[in-house]
Image (cartoon, rainbow, N blue to C red):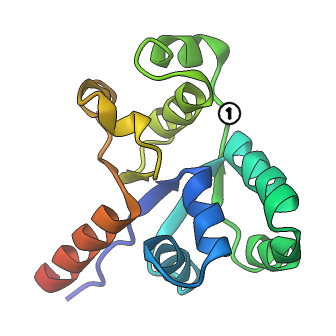
Amino acid sequence: MPPKPRPRVFLDANVVFSGMYSPEGAPAIILKLFVEGRLRAVISQQVLEEVVRTIGRRLPEALPSLRKLLLSVPPEVAEDPAPEDIGFWAQLVHGDDASVLAAAVAARPDYLVTGDRHFFANPGIAEKSGLRIVTPAQFLECWDEDAAVG
């Protein structure tokens, strides 16, 4: 039987930060799966910059670990979306969330994993974007279900 394809997972900045901040919990497990090569992480340039900025400000001692992660197992970095795409999605979500959503839509991942509640407040976001938007814990539930089937 051929190996199961690795899912492409667009990670929001809060997932990466949380995974770096705490070795426990769903975000850390997701980063571990990525490092092990069991999933393909996708981020946008803006998400990457936000992660670096947030870690530098709130958890500077983790910057060397983040650098090592990005150099040893680089994620796929999707292009930042065009302003008109951000404007389109800003009708459903606000500010930086619209940029993340537009980048994820353009990247066409299997999942958008985020801890940001704004993405779940309006069920039309997932429907209109065509994305499977899940929390880190929900992603791991899907991962377990897929593993049981595969």
Q: Nearer the viewer, residue 47 or 72?
A: 47
Q: Position of residue 135 (x, y in %)?
A: 36, 56
Quarter of the image where the C terminus is located: bottom left
Extreme residue in the front direction = 58
Q: Badge 1, how many Cα within 10 Å: few under 14, some, many 20+?
A: many
Q: Is residue 40 left or right of residue 128?
A: right
Q: Nearer the viewer, residue 103 or 113?
A: 113
Q: Is residue 42 left or right of residue 17?
A: left
Q: Residue at x 60, y 23 (%)?
A: 95
Q: Position of residue 66 (x, y in %)?
A: 78, 72
Quarter of the image where the N terminus is located: bottom left
Q: Nearer the viewer, residue 2 or 11?
A: 11
Residue type indicated by callout 1: Asp
Q: Quadrant of residue 145?
A: bottom left
Q: Quadrant of residue 80?
A: top right
Q: Position of residue 13 (x, y in %)?
A: 62, 52
Residue 95, relative to residue 45: is it above or below? above
Q: Residue at x 22, y 82 (%)?
A: 147
Residue 82, relative to residue 18: is it above or below? above
Q: Position of residue 22 (x, y in %)?
A: 61, 78
Q: Residue at x 74, y 77 (%)?
A: 69
Q: Residue at x 50, y 70 (%)?
A: 27
Provide the residue designation for mark 1: 80
Query: Dot 1: what SS?
Result: loop
Extreme residue in the left direction = 149
Residue 61, relative to residue 128: is it above or below? below
